[in-house]
Amino acid sequence: MAKVLVFIDNPGPALKKASLELLTIARSLGEPAVAFNGELHDDVAATLGAYGAQALYRPSTADLDDYLVGPKASYLAAAVQTAEATVVLTENSAEAREIAARLGIKLGAGVITDVVAVDPDGTAHKSVLAGSWTTTAKASTPVAVLTVKSNSITPDPAVTGTAPGTVTVEVPATATAASARITARNEKAASGRPDLAEARIVVAGGRGVDGNFGPVEDLADALGAAIGASRAATDAGWIGHDAQIGQTGKTVSPQLYISAGISGAIQQKAGMQTARVIVAVNKDAESPVFEIADFGIVGDLFQVLPQATAEIKKRKA
Amino acid sequence: MKIIVLVKHVPDAQFDRHLTGEGNTADRSESILSELDEYALEAALQLIEARGGEAAGNKVIALSMGPAGAVNAVKKSLQIGATEGAHLSDDALAGSDAAATSLALAAAIRHLGADTPADLIITGMASTDGETSLVPAQLAERLDLPQVTFAASLELDGGKLTARRDGDSHADTVEATLPALVSVTDQINDPRYPNFKGIMAAKKKTITTLSLADIGVDPAQVGRTGSWTAVESAEVRPARTAGTIITDEGDAGIQLVEFLAAQKLL
């Protein structure tokens, strides 16, 4: 049976949904194992067992987080060899993709990014060209490295849980040579809202909010949604760059995407057009976003959003 | 100081883009210099200008790999201000995946640095066609250079490079010594446009055309044969169609909520 290694990097006190999805996919492909980095909390160890991890690999050194990408790829390469894995799954974040990239060169393994589904034979499904095409791709190498987008499948614990044994993987002494060092880290304040990439609902604001994200935030909170923004809004400094959705920001595929005051140019569409349902509010009836909206409102977001927020609160009360 | 900037000729996203042929590769008939590479070029130009520019012996080489048309990405880079250009072009490169692309580019970078190695290789954060962001990291791996990627700011002091890299939950300060490989985000600067003087000056600049033989790469290692992944099928996603569009007459917010309730999204 194929051995499938899931890379989980510094999850903190609880595993993210994206990690649970990777473990679920790993079980569909073969025998799952985990290459872990960071502090292992008891709850996380228990969840790894509940999701069927057969083995848990951990690095021999604790300083991988002091460097950018390279040393983590060296560790992961050593873990793949120790585990004799033929498939490696990671999340699709910028850092995980780069670790996958270097891992691919180290192992002579094909890397496929932005995967949304994997067939049992290893064929990966992805969407490309800003979500306008879907492709299937496959690695022709003995090891395949796949970076999987979050919200690809519903996480599902194993029928029979496991108590995986821990194996220490020797990180090569040369791993940190020729690496950029992380000399300072500023944690960003947590918003209390869902993670943008994983959120079921996203409410996004653009140029039309004119510096006031208040109505967008209120609607998002009434719906339990994450907040996104167009590049115009982040460039104007109205909201952090982390919130940017589009070609140079994040790509999201939520169940519901509410676009407020965003014209919907191609760069923005690139980040959201695979959402299940799109709702758009914009003053300009000619905005391209209305071409892809399931429900569009030509109107003033400062009237429409607060009215919708009040109605949702009334119905939920 | 010698900087090599990687520039890619990509299908223009303003038009419908297509995947064609046996390898399901992008149709490049309506192509432009990748917008994200303009930030890399600007970063390079600012670095050399702060050090006396070309007059002080600094240079920026724009390197592109791609079919004949890709030379236009190099020409545009020369108009914007690159010192000289290089175009790696060979029929055997067609259909290269990220691993094969990084192999060919690494060889081209070594070739261009045969006399004087480059101090910096600068790329954009992704190509706007493949969108994988794999190549910069793979180049760092192949060239054994410190990787300073997704830089939202960049400072160079002597041989020490300092960059800011923004993550979802944190922002990191990253340091490395030259030579290094850098990729930059669209947050790093405001790229300049070519002006008339630049366009005229570019006509006199040198573009070196490189083949696989020139850079010592076996054709079997690149292209679809040398790639480690293959795109097996490609389909256009059915275009989204417009749904119900209403004009607010005072109750659109209520109608919005009714729509969400009907879709079971509340």
Image (cartoon, coloured by chain):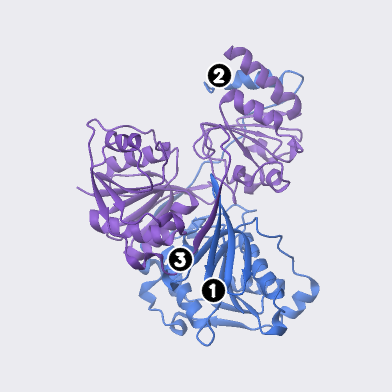
Chain colours: A purple, B blue
Q: Is residue A137 left or right of residue B29?
A: left
Q: Any mark on residue B178, and which? A: 1
Query: Gap between marks 1 and 2, in whole Å?
Result: 59 Å
Mark 3, residue position: A179
Where disc 3 sits, the SS reads loop
Residue displayed at 67% across by 71% down = B47
- Marks 3 and 2 close (CB-CB < 8 Å): no
Image quadrant assignment for residue B252: top right
Graded by Cα atoms within 10 Å as few (under 14), some (14 to 19) or many (20 or more), the crowding at tag 2 reads few
Q: Residue furthest right?
A: B196
Q: Name the chain letter of the residue that bears numbered label 1.
A: B
Mark 2, residue position: B262
Q: Give the answer, above or below, for where A270 lies relative to B178.
A: above
Residue B154: give x, y in percent of width and height.
Answer: 62, 63
- Marks 3 and 1 close (CB-CB < 8 Å): no
Q: Is residue A288 left or right of residue A53?
A: right
Q: Residue furthest bottom?
A: B115
